[in-house]
Image (cartoon, grey):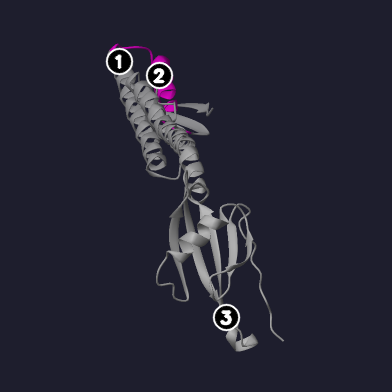
Amino acid sequence: SSAVQYSALPTRASFCVLDEFDFPLFCEGDSTAGMVDGFLRAGDRGVNGTFQWASTDEGFFAGFNQVYLRAAYRAPNWYAVVSEAESLVFEPLARFQQTLPAVLLLGVVVVGLLTNYQVRRTMKPLEQLVEGTRRVSERNFSHTVQVEADDEFGVLGDSFNLMADELGLRFRQLEAGRAIDRAALTGEEQTEVVGTLVNTFGTILDYDRMVVFLTDTNDPGRVTIWWTEGA
Protein backbone atom coordinates (compact mmCIF):
# COMPACT_ATOMS: atom_id res chain seq x y z
CA SER A 1 0.00 0.00 0.00
CA SER A 2 1.11 3.55 -0.58
CA ALA A 3 0.31 6.72 1.33
CA VAL A 4 -0.76 9.78 -0.63
CA GLN A 5 -0.37 13.22 0.92
CA TYR A 6 -2.47 16.13 -0.19
CA SER A 7 -1.66 19.81 0.34
CA ALA A 8 -4.30 22.50 0.12
CA LEU A 9 -3.74 25.24 -2.42
CA PRO A 10 -3.86 28.89 -1.40
CA THR A 11 -7.46 30.06 -1.64
CA ARG A 12 -6.60 32.83 -4.10
CA ALA A 13 -4.16 30.84 -6.28
CA SER A 14 -4.82 29.65 -9.83
CA PHE A 15 -4.15 26.04 -10.82
CA CYS A 16 -4.00 24.14 -14.10
CA VAL A 17 -3.14 20.62 -15.27
CA LEU A 18 -1.75 20.39 -18.80
CA ASP A 19 -1.32 17.26 -20.91
CA GLU A 20 1.70 16.34 -23.02
CA PHE A 21 0.49 18.71 -25.74
CA ASP A 22 0.23 21.62 -23.27
CA PHE A 23 -3.52 21.48 -23.52
CA PRO A 24 -5.30 22.47 -20.28
CA LEU A 25 -7.16 19.47 -18.88
CA PHE A 26 -8.36 21.17 -15.74
CA CYS A 27 -8.08 24.74 -14.48
CA GLU A 28 -9.33 26.51 -11.41
CA GLY A 29 -9.03 30.14 -10.37
CA ASP A 30 -8.82 33.49 -12.07
CA SER A 31 -6.40 34.43 -14.86
CA THR A 32 -5.68 30.83 -15.82
CA ALA A 33 -5.39 31.75 -19.51
CA GLY A 34 -2.60 34.18 -18.84
CA MET A 35 -0.89 31.64 -16.59
CA VAL A 36 -0.97 28.96 -19.32
CA ASP A 37 0.35 31.46 -21.84
CA GLY A 38 3.18 32.41 -19.50
CA PHE A 39 3.96 28.72 -19.00
CA LEU A 40 4.16 28.15 -22.73
CA ARG A 41 6.57 31.05 -23.10
CA ALA A 42 8.76 29.88 -20.20
CA GLY A 43 11.11 28.07 -22.59
CA ASP A 44 13.15 25.13 -21.27
CA ARG A 45 10.92 23.64 -18.61
CA GLY A 46 12.66 20.65 -17.16
CA VAL A 47 11.04 18.67 -14.38
CA ASN A 48 10.06 21.71 -12.33
CA GLY A 49 10.71 25.41 -12.22
CA THR A 50 9.33 28.89 -11.74
CA PHE A 51 8.41 31.78 -14.01
CA GLN A 52 6.74 35.15 -13.91
CA TRP A 53 4.00 36.56 -16.04
CA ALA A 54 1.89 39.69 -16.03
CA SER A 55 -1.63 40.68 -16.88
CA THR A 56 -2.66 44.15 -17.89
CA ASP A 57 -2.76 45.40 -14.30
CA GLU A 58 -0.79 42.98 -12.12
CA GLY A 59 2.22 40.68 -12.04
CA PHE A 60 2.17 37.03 -11.02
CA PHE A 61 4.57 34.43 -9.64
CA ALA A 62 4.11 30.88 -10.92
CA GLY A 63 5.63 27.46 -10.51
CA PHE A 64 5.25 24.13 -12.28
CA ASN A 65 6.04 20.52 -11.61
CA GLN A 66 5.94 17.46 -13.83
CA VAL A 67 3.38 14.78 -12.93
CA TYR A 68 4.89 11.33 -13.56
CA LEU A 69 2.37 9.04 -15.24
CA ARG A 70 4.49 6.90 -17.54
CA ALA A 71 5.77 4.47 -14.88
CA ALA A 72 2.41 3.82 -13.25
CA TYR A 73 -0.06 4.27 -16.11
CA ARG A 74 2.12 4.02 -19.25
CA ALA A 75 0.85 7.46 -20.19
CA PRO A 76 2.67 10.67 -21.12
CA ASN A 77 3.63 12.94 -18.28
CA TRP A 78 1.56 16.00 -17.44
CA TYR A 79 2.42 19.36 -15.88
CA ALA A 80 0.77 20.97 -12.85
CA VAL A 81 1.04 24.77 -12.81
CA VAL A 82 0.21 27.08 -9.90
CA SER A 83 0.16 30.87 -10.01
CA GLU A 84 -0.47 33.60 -7.46
CA ALA A 85 -0.54 37.40 -7.73
CA GLU A 86 2.51 39.35 -6.53
CA SER A 87 0.31 41.40 -4.21
CA LEU A 88 -0.82 38.21 -2.46
CA VAL A 89 2.74 36.86 -2.25
CA PHE A 90 3.98 40.08 -0.65
CA GLU A 91 0.89 40.60 1.48
CA PRO A 92 2.52 39.07 4.64
CA LEU A 93 5.51 41.38 4.13
CA ALA A 94 3.17 44.36 3.77
CA ARG A 95 1.38 43.40 6.99
CA PHE A 96 4.74 43.03 8.69
CA GLN A 97 5.78 46.49 7.50
CA GLN A 98 2.56 47.87 8.94
CA THR A 99 3.04 46.21 12.32
CA LEU A 100 6.80 46.81 12.53
CA PRO A 101 6.52 50.43 13.79
CA ALA A 102 4.12 49.36 16.52
CA VAL A 103 6.42 46.48 17.52
CA LEU A 104 9.44 48.80 17.58
CA LEU A 105 7.51 51.38 19.62
CA LEU A 106 6.44 48.69 22.07
CA GLY A 107 10.04 47.50 22.32
CA VAL A 108 11.25 51.04 23.01
CA VAL A 109 8.60 51.49 25.72
CA VAL A 110 9.50 48.16 27.35
CA VAL A 111 13.22 48.97 27.25
CA GLY A 112 12.49 52.42 28.70
CA LEU A 113 10.44 50.96 31.54
CA LEU A 114 13.09 48.36 32.32
CA THR A 115 15.81 51.01 32.21
CA ASN A 116 13.82 53.29 34.51
CA TYR A 117 13.25 50.42 36.92
CA GLN A 118 16.93 49.52 36.93
CA VAL A 119 17.97 53.15 37.44
CA ARG A 120 15.52 53.59 40.33
CA ARG A 121 16.72 50.30 41.81
CA THR A 122 20.29 51.60 41.59
CA MET A 123 19.52 55.10 42.84
CA LYS A 124 17.61 54.00 45.96
CA PRO A 125 20.70 52.57 47.74
CA LEU A 126 22.67 55.63 46.69
CA GLU A 127 20.02 57.93 48.16
CA GLN A 128 20.12 55.97 51.41
CA LEU A 129 23.91 56.22 51.53
CA VAL A 130 23.74 59.97 50.90
CA GLU A 131 21.19 60.36 53.69
CA GLY A 132 23.37 58.29 56.01
CA THR A 133 26.40 60.45 55.18
CA ARG A 134 24.41 63.58 55.98
CA ARG A 135 23.36 62.19 59.36
CA VAL A 136 26.95 61.18 60.17
CA SER A 137 28.08 64.72 59.35
CA GLU A 138 25.53 65.89 61.92
CA ARG A 139 27.04 63.42 64.44
CA ASN A 140 23.98 61.20 64.36
CA PHE A 141 25.70 57.83 64.47
CA SER A 142 22.65 55.83 65.56
CA HIS A 143 21.05 55.97 62.09
CA THR A 144 21.75 52.82 60.05
CA VAL A 145 21.56 52.52 56.29
CA GLN A 146 19.12 49.79 55.17
CA VAL A 147 20.36 48.47 51.84
CA GLU A 148 18.54 45.24 50.99
CA ALA A 149 20.69 44.02 48.13
CA ASP A 150 23.06 41.13 47.52
CA ASP A 151 25.44 43.13 45.36
CA GLU A 152 28.12 45.78 45.80
CA PHE A 153 25.58 48.23 47.24
CA GLY A 154 24.70 45.77 50.01
CA VAL A 155 28.39 45.35 50.88
CA LEU A 156 28.86 49.13 50.80
CA GLY A 157 25.85 49.64 53.09
CA ASP A 158 27.18 47.13 55.64
CA SER A 159 30.62 48.76 55.55
CA PHE A 160 29.05 52.20 56.00
CA ASN A 161 27.10 51.03 59.06
CA LEU A 162 30.26 49.53 60.60
CA MET A 163 32.13 52.78 59.94
CA ALA A 164 29.30 54.83 61.51
CA ASP A 165 29.29 52.59 64.62
CA GLU A 166 33.06 52.90 64.92
CA LEU A 167 32.96 56.69 64.54
CA GLY A 168 30.15 56.92 67.08
CA LEU A 169 32.15 54.92 69.59
CA ARG A 170 35.24 57.09 69.04
CA PHE A 171 33.27 60.31 69.49
CA ARG A 172 31.62 59.00 72.65
CA GLN A 173 35.01 58.06 74.06
CA LEU A 174 36.33 61.55 73.33
CA GLU A 175 33.29 63.16 74.93
CA ALA A 176 33.61 60.90 77.97
CA GLY A 177 37.27 61.80 78.40
CA ARG A 178 36.50 65.50 78.14
CA ALA A 179 33.68 65.29 80.64
CA ILE A 180 35.86 63.48 83.19
CA ASP A 181 38.70 65.96 82.68
CA ARG A 182 36.35 68.91 83.18
CA ALA A 183 34.88 67.38 86.30
CA ALA A 184 38.33 66.69 87.76
CA LEU A 185 39.84 70.05 86.82
CA THR A 186 36.96 72.19 88.09
CA GLY A 187 37.34 70.76 91.57
CA GLU A 188 33.86 69.35 91.82
CA GLU A 189 32.79 67.22 94.74
CA GLN A 190 33.71 63.58 94.76
CA THR A 191 30.12 62.48 94.21
CA GLU A 192 29.79 64.71 91.15
CA VAL A 193 33.01 63.40 89.66
CA VAL A 194 31.90 59.81 90.19
CA GLY A 195 28.47 60.59 88.73
CA THR A 196 30.11 62.10 85.68
CA LEU A 197 32.37 59.03 85.38
CA VAL A 198 29.46 56.62 85.57
CA ASN A 199 27.30 58.59 83.14
CA THR A 200 30.03 58.97 80.54
CA PHE A 201 31.16 55.35 80.73
CA GLY A 202 27.57 54.31 80.29
CA THR A 203 27.59 55.87 76.82
CA ILE A 204 30.51 53.80 75.58
CA LEU A 205 30.18 50.54 77.53
CA ASP A 206 27.39 48.02 78.04
CA TYR A 207 27.41 46.70 81.63
CA ASP A 208 25.16 45.05 84.18
CA ARG A 209 26.79 46.68 87.20
CA MET A 210 29.61 49.20 87.63
CA VAL A 211 31.67 49.43 90.81
CA VAL A 212 34.05 52.33 91.50
CA PHE A 213 36.67 52.13 94.27
CA LEU A 214 38.04 55.43 95.61
CA THR A 215 40.90 55.67 98.09
CA ASP A 216 41.44 58.61 100.40
CA THR A 217 44.87 60.16 99.91
CA ASN A 218 44.79 61.44 103.46
CA ASP A 219 43.72 58.06 104.84
CA PRO A 220 45.09 55.22 102.66
CA GLY A 221 43.18 52.63 104.61
CA ARG A 222 39.87 54.19 103.77
CA VAL A 223 38.14 53.06 100.57
CA THR A 224 34.85 54.40 99.25
CA ILE A 225 32.86 52.09 96.99
CA TRP A 226 30.35 53.44 94.47
CA TRP A 227 28.21 51.10 92.41
CA THR A 228 25.37 51.39 90.00
CA GLU A 229 23.18 49.06 87.97
CA GLY A 230 23.43 48.97 84.22
CA ALA A 231 20.67 50.06 81.90
Q: Nearer the viewer, residue 227 or 68?
A: 68
Q: Nearer the viewer, residue 194 or 176?
A: 176
Looking at this view, name the residue that lies furthest to the left.
185
Magenta stretch: helix, strand or loop mostly = helix
- Compared with 68, 166 (above or below) is above
User: Looking at the image, is mark 3 or mark 2 earlier in the sequence?
Assistant: 3
Q: Nearer the viewer, residue 203 or 37?
A: 37
**Dots 3 and 2: beta carbons under 8 Å?**
no
Residue to which mark 3 is pinned? 68
- The nearer-to-camera label among 1 and 3 is 3
Q: Nearer the viewer, residue 3 or 125?
A: 3
Under circle 3, the secondary element is loop
Q: The residue under label 1 is which amino acid type? A: Arg
Residue to which mark 2 is pinned? 196
Report the Cα–Cα distance between label 3 and label 2. 114 Å
- Quarter of the image for residue 1 reads bottom right
User: Looking at the image, is mark 1 or mark 3 earlier in the sequence?
Assistant: 3
Tell me if residue 162 can be seen. yes
